[in-house]
């Protein structure tokens, strides 16, 4: 079995030496377990938190253990009812080719519905995050203005397109002209702001009426520019603050940057709420998947993936994710 282990805890940005690639023997499923062969591994920002011992909502990966992650692939052997060899599944575990998993978190999927890798992105955890966060916290209404940061990424793509389906004016924020062009021309957002340029001037031009919903994926300077532009009764969906993940080690795995003046929350009656998709997202996965497949069939939900070849390249690809090197949902194809 080919595996990527956590060798040591990063200081700041992770480096390749924080990981170790090993060949081990094929695991055998225990009674009640399923042996899954991964075809795709999802690489996600939350993995930076798992590499750290800083306070978080989930336990860190132990040193020397397989890096945490979700895969999609097929069942090779099963000692659990309901799964047979050849089944296509979402929910294999870890940065490794083979894993033994309990069926509780395994979803059997129909490979004819969509390409397998989509079940890690638009039809997977990031898509579910977008859907749950908008349903529960963003609650978009037709005619409202929604701003989405990391707009070309896995979560951002879906948030913005769901906003358009709900009749909102949607403004993306992304790094560089190529990503911005994709966000407007391919995904159909109304405008896209390049966060490497003058944020204030671009926000003034794109949403002079102010902002009803801000989907927060990055934090830092982007948050500081967006926050004062909230309209009364605005909602701020706190999904992530990726710009801070490499900055603080030791205190909080989400970083510790100084925030905006929260007095405006009272005056404008703002609603700011954080959430973690795994809190209550997965029981709703079947409904989410059905709705998304409908949007995809209707041409209202597009997606872009950044596919890296080979598990051995996962560490470098992950390091790049935390610096904006990916363009679209980052997945590793495991040969
Ligand atoms: P993306 O596919 O959006 O990839 C990350 C993107 O973040 C990069 O492409 C880059 O986009 C941007 N980025 C990276 N580093 C920085 C930086 N230092 N400053 C500003 N932008 C940066 O990732 P996901 O869609 O998977 O995740 C987006 C956010 O959602 C993350 O914060 C993640 O933690 C969060 N998340 C939260 C979940 C929850 O349950 N709460 C579940 C899943 C994700 P660009 O080049 O455009 O700047």
Image: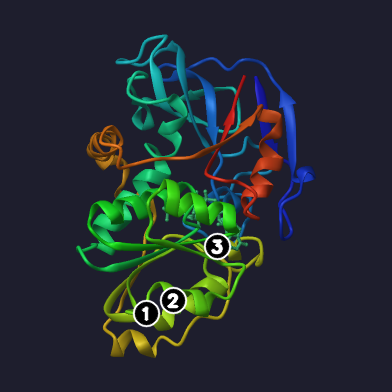
Which of the numbered marks, if any, corresponds to residue 55? Answer: 3
Q: Nearer the viewer, mark 3 or mark 1?
A: 1
Classify 10 Å Cα crowding around label 1: few (below 14), some (14-19), many (20 and above). Answer: few
As helix, strand or loop, the secondary structure at mark 3 comes to loop
Quarter of the image where one finds residue 118: top left
Q: Which residue is mark 1?
A: 208
| Residue 58 in sight here | no
Residue at image position (65%, 55%) is 323
Image position of 191 with respect to 208: above or below: above
Residue positioned 27% across, 62% down in the render? 168
Spot occupied by residue 304 in the image (x, y as percentages of width and height): 48, 40
Residue farthest to the right, as pictured: 17
128 is higher (above) or lower (below) than 140: above
Measure the C-alpha gap from mark 2 to mark 1: 6 Å
Camera-side residue of 29 and 15: 15
Q: Earlier in the sequence, mark 3 or mark 1?
A: 3
Asked whether the residues under the numbered discs 2 and 1 touch, taking CB atoms below 8 Å apart as contact, a structural biologist would say: yes
Question: Residue 51: x, y in percent?
Answer: 63, 50
Q: Residue at x 37, y 60 (%)?
A: 190
* Residue 205: numbered disc: 2
């Amino acid at each position: 079995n080919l595996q990527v282990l956590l060798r040591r805890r990063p200081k700041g940005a992770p480096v390749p030496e924080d990981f170790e690639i090993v060949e081990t023997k094929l695991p055998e499923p225990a009674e009640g377990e399923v042996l899954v062969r991964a075809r795709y591994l999802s690489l996600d920002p939350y993995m930076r938190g798992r590499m750290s011992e800083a306070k978080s909502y989930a336990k860190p990966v132990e040193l020397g253990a397989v890096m945490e992650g979700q895969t999609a692939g097929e069942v090779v052997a099963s000692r659990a009812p309901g799964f047979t060899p050849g089944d296509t599944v979402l929910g294999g575990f870890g940065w490794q080719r083979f894993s033994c998993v309990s069926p509780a978190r395994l979803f059997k999927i129909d490979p004819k519905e969509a390409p397998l890798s989509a079940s890690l992105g638009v039809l997977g955890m990031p898509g579910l995050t977008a859907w749950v966060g908008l349903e529960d916290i963003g609650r978009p209404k037709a005619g409202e203005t929604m701003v989405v940061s990391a707009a070309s990424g896995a979560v951002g793509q879906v948030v913005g397109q769901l906003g358009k389906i709900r009749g909102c004016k949607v403004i993306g924020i992304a790094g560089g002209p190529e990503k911005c062009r994709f966000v407007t021309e391919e995904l159909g957002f109304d405008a896209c702001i390049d966060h490497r340029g003058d944020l204030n001037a671009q926000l003034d031009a794109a949403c002079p009426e102010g902002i009803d919903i801000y989907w927060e994926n990055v934090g830092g300077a982007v948050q500081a520019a967006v926050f004062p532009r909230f309209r009364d009764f605005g909602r701020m969906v706190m999904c992530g603050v990726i710009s801070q993940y490499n900055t603080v080690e030791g205190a909080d795995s989400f970083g510790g940057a100084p925030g905006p003046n929260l007095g405006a929350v009272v005056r404008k009656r703002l609603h700011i709420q954080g959430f973690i998709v795994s809190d209550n997202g997965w029981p709703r996965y079947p409904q989410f998947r059905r709705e998304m497949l409908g949007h995809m069939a209707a041409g209202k939900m597009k997606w872009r993936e950044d596919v890296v070849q080979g598990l051995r390249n996962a560490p470098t690809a992950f390091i790049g994710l935390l610096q904006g090197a990916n363009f679209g949902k980052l997945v590793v194809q495991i040969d």
